[in-house]
Image (cartoon, rainbow, N blue to C red):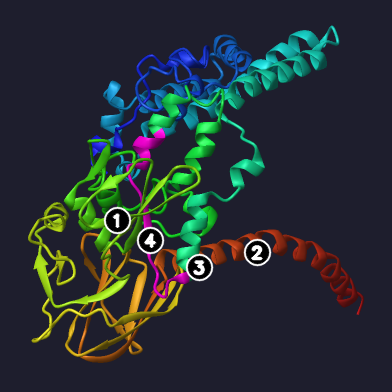
């Protein structure tokens, strides 16, 4: 991450007060949180009694090097959690290798909370020592643990809303419609929920948080927001919410940036007018059905149905297949220009692809849709292509360095095309193209784990073998001397 993204969502300047009063800045469960950043990322409450015991340990045992280490570590970690509110995070970001690979400065609260818990334990020891002579140590420890457990349960469970299980897992009318259409289709397709993050935020505010009636959230399941597709094994264009590679979120957005498709349009005359560039992305990414809480207007889509929950389902009239062949490429200097070209009015995704590397297609290359999925899965894909002319095979699935490709059994380089898709150059004729996800990081990790297990076995087993061997060696030595 650049510094601006790594330092985003820091703890608020006055967040230290939440160690004493957890809802000092309000409570998202009741939609009253008015602090900066994300509440649950800077929530560090460990209980009132543990916090006071930690302070007592610092005051009474301030000369103890362990106490000094824990207290100093807690202070430094909290300064880091404050991100750009102090210069500490910036200094660490530029001075410590690897800091650019972390996001959310508030994650350093882990070390603050660990230090507070350990200091609280030392403080509880002080209390127990003072009361041991009166035989009250056990009762005091039990009292502190019981009060702390009740304190944390009362506060933490407010952030864990609980809906009726049967209602939450029951299939929605939207799911039933999409599953029926999937069973009728011969080729795979995706769906997309328009502006899902915005709709979720509106539902949150309309329900005044989640401490009261959860019916709006139960209704919201029918919109099949990102990650909800996993319940019905349906394929959505944006798939999983958050924690995606940067070139994914540059198209589909995340909590850090809106991407190309948010907002998807504007309200006009009681309908949602879809932006042309969003429609182009939907077509390119094999989206056949679009979900929205309101009717959508666009020349490229048509109403399909309205689910029992009131979700409007629209069908994209001419989505591109999951895999197809183009006859030309358009060179982009970098990822930013590739995004601009992707939604440019003169870019036809069915005829050409955007690349950021120099790609020389064979002479006479042309577009084709004569590509079929023979064996799709989450970690491997087998395609069959029968081409009259050569071209660039485009697979509208995410690219990653872990993917490897073969064409007719021979390894082939994978190109990143259209910002985040996979591409392979093909000659004319019939081809069998396979993609397998085998990242080297997993192989290296497996070898490292095997080495670690071997070392652990040696540490545990070798001393035992030596202990068992000593009596035998002693007996042999005694027999040898006697002989």
Q: Quadrant of the N terminus?
A: top left
The image shows residue 398 at horizontal and vertical percentages of 33, 62
Eye-nearest disc, 3 or 1: 1
Do we see residue 263 in this rendering?
Answer: no
Please state which of residues 451 and 17 is positioned toward the viewer in this rendering.
Answer: 17
The image shows residue 463 at horizontal and vertical percentages of 72, 60
Based on the picture, tell me whether residue 468 belongs to the magenta stretch. no
Eye-nearest disc, 3 or 2: 3
**Would you name the residue on which mark 3 appears?**
447
Eye-nearest disc, 2 or 4: 4
Task: For the residues labelled 3 and 1, say whether their Cβ atoms are less than 8 Å apart.
Answer: no
**Crowding near pointer 3: few (<14 within 10 Å), some, many (20+)?**
few
In this picture, which residue range is highlighted in magenta? Answer: 184-200
Please state which of residues 156 and 187 is positioned toward the viewer in this rendering.
Answer: 187
**Would you name the residue on which mark 2 appears?**
458
Task: For the residues labelled 4 and 3, say whether their Cβ atoms are less than 8 Å apart.
Answer: no
Based on the picture, tell me whether residue 188 belongs to the magenta stretch. yes
Q: Which mark is residue 190?
A: 4
Q: Is residue 373 above or below residue 207?
A: below
**Would you name the residue on which mark 1 appears?**
302
Q: CA distance from mark 3 to mark 2?
A: 16 Å
Query: Which of the marked residues, 4 or 1, is nearer the chain's N terminus?
Result: 4
Query: Which of the marked residues, 4 or 3, is nearer the chain's N terminus?
Result: 4
Q: CA distance from mark 2 to mark 1?
A: 67 Å
Q: Is residue 181 above or below residue 69?
A: below
Name the residue at 29% across, 50% down.
Answer: 252
């Amino acid at each position: 991450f650049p510094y601006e993204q790594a330092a985003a969502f820091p703890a608020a300047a006055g967040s230290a007060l939440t160690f004493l009063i957890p809802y000092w800045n309000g409570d998202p469960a009741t939609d009253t949180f008015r602090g900066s950043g994300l509440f649950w990322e800077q929530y560090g409450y460990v209980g009132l009694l543990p916090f006071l015991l930690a302070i007592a340990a610092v005051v009474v045992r301030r000369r103890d090097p362990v106490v000094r280490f824990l207290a100093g570590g807690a202070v430094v970690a909290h300064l880091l959690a404050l991100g750009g509110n102090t210069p500490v995070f910036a200094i660490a970001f530029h001075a410590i290798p690897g800091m650019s690979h972390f996001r959310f400065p508030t994650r350093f609260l882990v070390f603050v909370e660990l230090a507070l818990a350990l200091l609280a334990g030392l403080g509880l020891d002080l209390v127990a020592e003072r009361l041991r002579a009166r035989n009250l140590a056990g009762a005091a420890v039990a009292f502190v643990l019981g009060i702390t457990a009740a304190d944390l349960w009362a506060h933490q469970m407010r952030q864990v809303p609980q809906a009726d299980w049967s209602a939450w897992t029951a299939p929605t009318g939207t799911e039933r419609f999409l599953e029926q259409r999937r069973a009728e289709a011969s080729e795979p397709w995706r769906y997309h929920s328009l502006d899902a993050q915005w709709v979720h935020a509106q539902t949150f505010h309309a329900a005044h948080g989640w401490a009261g009636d959860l019916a709006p959230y139960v209704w919201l399941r029918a919109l099949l927001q990102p990650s909800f597709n996993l319940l019905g094994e349906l394929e959505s264009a944006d798939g999983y919410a958050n924690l995606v590679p940067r070139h994914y979120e540059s198209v589909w957005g995340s909590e850090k940036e809106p991407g190309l498709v948010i907002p998807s349009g504007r309200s006009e005359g009681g309908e949602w007018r879809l932006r042309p560039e969003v429609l182009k992305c939907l077509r390119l990414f094999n989206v056949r059905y679009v979900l929205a809480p309101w009717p959508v207007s666009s020349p490229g889509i048509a109403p399909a149905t309205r689910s029992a929950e009131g979700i409007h389902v629209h069908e994209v009239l001419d989505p591109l297949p999951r895999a197809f062949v183009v006859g030309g490429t358009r060179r982009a200097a970098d990822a930013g220009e590739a995004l601009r070209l992707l939604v440019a009015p003169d870019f036809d995704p069915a005829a050409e692809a955007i690349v950021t590397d120099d790609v020389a297609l064979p002479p006479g290359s042309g577009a084709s849709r004569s590509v079929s999925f023979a064996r799709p899965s989450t970690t491997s894909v087998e395609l069959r292509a029968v081409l009259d002319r050569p071209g660039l095979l485009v697979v509208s699935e995410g690219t990653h360095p872990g993917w490897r490709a073969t064409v007719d059994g021979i390894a082939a380089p994978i190109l990143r095309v259209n910002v985040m898709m996979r591409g392979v150059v093909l000659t004319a004729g019939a081809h069998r193209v396979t993609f397998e996800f085998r990242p080297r990081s997993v192989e290296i990790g497996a070898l490292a784990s095997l080495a670690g297990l071997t070392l652990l076995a040696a540490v545990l087993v070798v001393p035992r073998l030596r202990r068992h061997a000593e009596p035998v060696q002693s007996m042999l030595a005694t027999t040898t001397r006697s002989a």
